[in-house]
Amino acid sequence: MTQRFIAVSLILLLITPLGVAARPAPQVRNGPPPIFLGDTKDSLPQYVCAADAFASYYVLEQIQVSRLDVKYKFHLGIVPFLLDGSGGKYDVDETRRGELLANGDWDCLLTTMDSVALNGAGAITAVVDESAGADQIWAQTGINTLNDLKGKRVAYAQGSVGQFMVLYALAVAGLRPNRDVIPVESDSVESAVKAFKDKHADAVSGWEPDILAAADAGGHPLIASDKLRVAVDVIVTSRNAIANRADVAQAFHEAWFDALRAQFESLDAAAAAIAQWGHNDWSGIQTSSAAKDLKDGLSSIAQATLAQNVAVMNDPSALVQRIEAARRVWALAEVKASAVKASTLVEPRFVLAATKNSALATAGRPVNDTFLMGSRPKIDMGDASQAQTLAVLPCQRFDFLPDSAILTGESRRILDICVLPVMQSTTGTYLKIVGSAAWPGPVGTFTEQEIRDFALARAISVRDYLISKGIDQSRFIVEAVLPPKDRQNSEDEDVQAQDRYVALTLLESGR
């Protein structure tokens, strides 16, 4: 059974296309020997990338089979994790992966962004995709919001994307791992689902297809990555390659986007090339049904185009914020991340330079074209009036300048940490903002309408700040409430303080 761990899992395949055997090159680096295709005894430099098998990672296969590496004047070597029939030679754990990248034994690693946030081993030089539905959290009857997980047992595969999704979901609801919930750690999604089926867990996190078996135990989907876009796959380039082999790194990135262009323009041809790699049962891309298999694999993955990568890399602050948010999430679980400054973990130069190659431009589109970061895809938001509560956010007390609806600097900082990352990483969701204001006495000092207008103005202030940060204004529902009767016209400061808040509730359409 394959696993998609933080470095993402499944596997990248050893291939024998067109009757030419793929063979490992002489091991001149530490770690498993990279696999090259064809004759490498020429003067072209070699570029080694390590990766698991995952549908959006099969671009690497295309590069080799289509000889795009040679076109761009280098030889691509692949270190395929968990390669079948390798006797464990390609089984490399997370710690070792980071070491081999940091040491320059590998030029690049395809992994998840939360892994980069943890180890800081290289720099993100391109975004591959966002998980758009494959990763899911299922729950038993009675658990309908993320807040309902409090006090419950939650199962997941330890060290996996499933664990990170649980941690992120808990952070959204203001719940603390190991304190507010009871973790049920497993070594695979299959065993986590079994714990759920055996009533040893109240909720379970994992990915398709294994997670779907939770339905057999009466479970229902609580949240999936089509709404909670927290699993982001990236290309991480070693600092050695960036500093000393920048020309070859540039060639690799252009080959990557050339292969993407070809895939977007002809999925059938790309799928056929991938199937020629061999090990079809492992990849799930069968020769007789290659196009369908690849399309199915990519349907729940929102791939990032060159244009979207350019948008992200022109202003990498979104990536940096995601890295910082991931570190905060891991910190809640008492997992210490690398101290490397987040801004140094992004290197835009290769993507931006690729735009000079006009041959990489394409009108083709990915199978799933809902990539969120750096673009505004047309995603069906559903009917706001039918949306249901997904989570009540933990931050509800915001300071304003005296007798005004102007947020203080500290309140803006809280919104940046507690709310903005949630809105940036979710789709198909609304934020309900309910403003409340104290009603000071004595009787007759203020009218009901004045108090309501003041409460609404503070809610609008929160909304407008989030809009200024790039959140679509259509994703907000703004309301105001009055203090209960027994706290109206009060002259007691402690009583008044109870009604000075802005309540934030994340709503999910289509539930």
Image (spheres, rainbow, N blue to C red):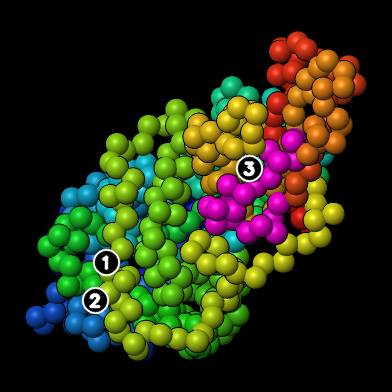
Q: Residues within 10 Å of mark 3 (few under 14, many from 20)?
A: many
Which amino acid type corresponds to the residue marked 3 in the rendered image?
A: Val
Secondary structure beneath disc 1? helix
Which amino acid type corresponds to the residue marked 2 in the rendered image?
A: Ala
- The answer to whether residue 432 is left or right of residue 119 is right
Stretch in magenta = 454-476
Q: Residue at x 58, y 47 (%)?
A: 465
Q: Given contact means CB atoms under 8 Å apart, are the residues at marks 3 and 2 in contact?
A: no
Residue closest to the far right: 485
The residue indicated by pointer 3 is 462
For residue 251, the mark is 2
**Labels 3, 1: front one:** 3
Which amino acid type corresponds to the residue marked 1 in the rendered image?
A: Arg
Q: Residue 13 is drawn in which quadrant? A: bottom left
- How many numbered marks appear? 3
Secondary structure beneath disc 3? helix
**Labels 3, 2: front one:** 3
Secondary structure beneath disc 2? helix
Q: Residue 509 is drawn in which quadrant? A: bottom right
Residue closest to the far front: 445
